[in-house]
Amino acid sequence: MSESFDVIVIGGGPAGYPCAIRAAQLGFKTACIDAWLNRDNTPAFGGTCLNAGCIPSKALLESSEVYHRAQHEFALHGVKAAGVTLDLAQMQKRKEAISRSLTGGIKTLFKANGVTGLEGHGKLLGNGQVQFKAHGGETKTLSAKHIVIATGSEPINLKVAPFDGKNIIDSWGALDLAEVPKRLGVIGAGVIGVELGSVWSRLGAKTVLLEALPNFLPMVDQQVAKEAQRQLVKQGLDIRLGAKVTGAKSGKSGVAVEFELNGAKHSEEFDKLIVAVGRKPYTNGLGVEAAGVQLDERGFVKVDKHYRTNVQGVYAVGDAIGGAMLAHKGIEEGVALAEQLAGHHTEVNYNAVPSVIYTAPEVAWVGRSEEQAKAAGFEVKTGTGSFVPSGRAKALEQAVGLIKVISDVKTDRILGVHMVGPYVSELVAEAVVALEFGATTEDIALTMHAHPSLGEVFHDAILAVDGRAIHAVNKKK
């Protein structure tokens, strides 16, 4: 006889474990199955995000920035740090400790909320049943009224540059390097490529980013994207736009990469090559075909606005269903689904999903860019605020970048906010709230911001929309 639950969540990443916790809080008997194994074969909840993505990458980004600042900036503060050296092994040890503490915390949360955490592989059997195979080998059948697919995503493997786990590596491999490459190649200058390239560039690698698209960060307002590109190039990143990789051959001494740029063929040698061209849904061994769950042409699980698949009682959330493949978007979907199962009227506002690139300076945005707003038919007005005259930014020795606000001429409602500068990963939250509540520029203009603070730059950008910024040169109307 199979063990019965109200809700079974397959996947313990950012979409899965919050869904399981919220379901349990709402009174459902809940189990969460996760198949993740770390390099040492230890199981861990948290998925790619906590084990090999968001969290370890941010740990390395922070450590590499501290190292860079110690070399180039501390003296400006009157802090003499002669003979600064890199201990990469300790840096990696710190990164692992942060990830392990957070993944272990999920088990604590499961226990506190009454979720049954199952470490192993889950497979759909149809008719409300799931096969669970523990990492130790035990197999049993579980049943539930509601089954949630939250299996996440995995890196895309390019045919012209297939992963070999040694010289041609994915994002996980790029976080685990035991030594700094002398020359590093990165295919893709999106969020993951830029972040990983920044880490190793700061630590001493000569880093080349090969991006097939003609524009840098095309999803970002291009005024902001160009400023971000300028700052990153100034720091030493070699960003080549319009570079289409045609082949990569791994050898004893590294990787030979061939690419086309400006109509000419090029070839370069790298010690390591990171392939960071995006991610695809992970449904390997999930049993979607046997269970009759429909996938779209790209392999994403097809769902309706309530996250229901075509099979009664089977749902999906997070990266597995596509859209913005972001941890926080998955969290909100998982929680929303759990609440919907309990009869609550909950939904996710996909027009107010923030995105962040944790470089230095950081890049963050929410809502439409000026280009996207115009393409959608809006008549827009914009305003920018600069971090250059910001007293707080100067005190941080990070007085670079800008914030741009895009609003609707007819209604004054804010359509989007795009930023590049210090700690904009935190500042973007105010813009998210503004979009969530349908705020106008006048609403934010009347909102007092502390002085001195980085948030004043957002306030100045808002004021600049109507030509009344205090700390910027206003455009003539």
Image: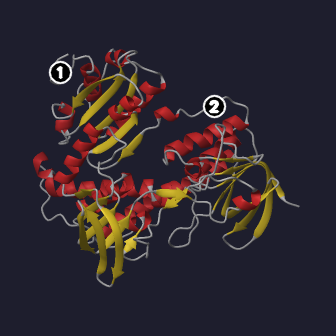
For marks 1 and 2, give the CA distance. Answer: 42 Å
N-terminal-most mark, 1 or 2: 2
Mark 1 lies on a secondary structure that is: loop
Q: In which quadrant is the N terminus drawn?
A: bottom right
Q: Amino acid at mark 1?
A: Asn
Q: Is residue 136 left or right of residue 81?
A: right
The image shows residue 4, relative to residue 420, as above or below, that is below
The outermost residue toward the front is 263
Nearest the camera: 373 or 234?
373
In this rendering, the answer to whether 264 lies above or below 26 is: below
**Residue 346 disc label:** 2
Callout count:
2
- Taking depth in this image into account, of 104 and 356 the one nearest to the observer is 356
Residue 294, position in %: x, y?
68, 52
Q: Residue furthest bottom?
A: 252
The residue closer to the viewer here, 444 or 265, is 265
Question: Residue 88, position in %: x, y?
Answer: 30, 68
Q: Residue at x 67, y 35 (%)?
A: 339
Say left or right for 267 vs 116: left
Residue type of the residue flagged with mark 2: Thr
Q: Which mark is residue 16?
A: none
Image x and y of residue 121, in percent: 67, 65
Q: Which residue is mark 1?
A: 474
Name which quarter of the figure residue 345 lies in: top right
Can residue 324 be seen in this snapshot? yes
Element assignment for label 2:
loop
Q: Nearer the viewer, mark 1 or mark 2?
A: 1
Q: Are the two marked residues, 1 and 2, in contact with CB atoms closer than 8 angstroms?
A: no
* Residue ID at (55%, 53%): 105
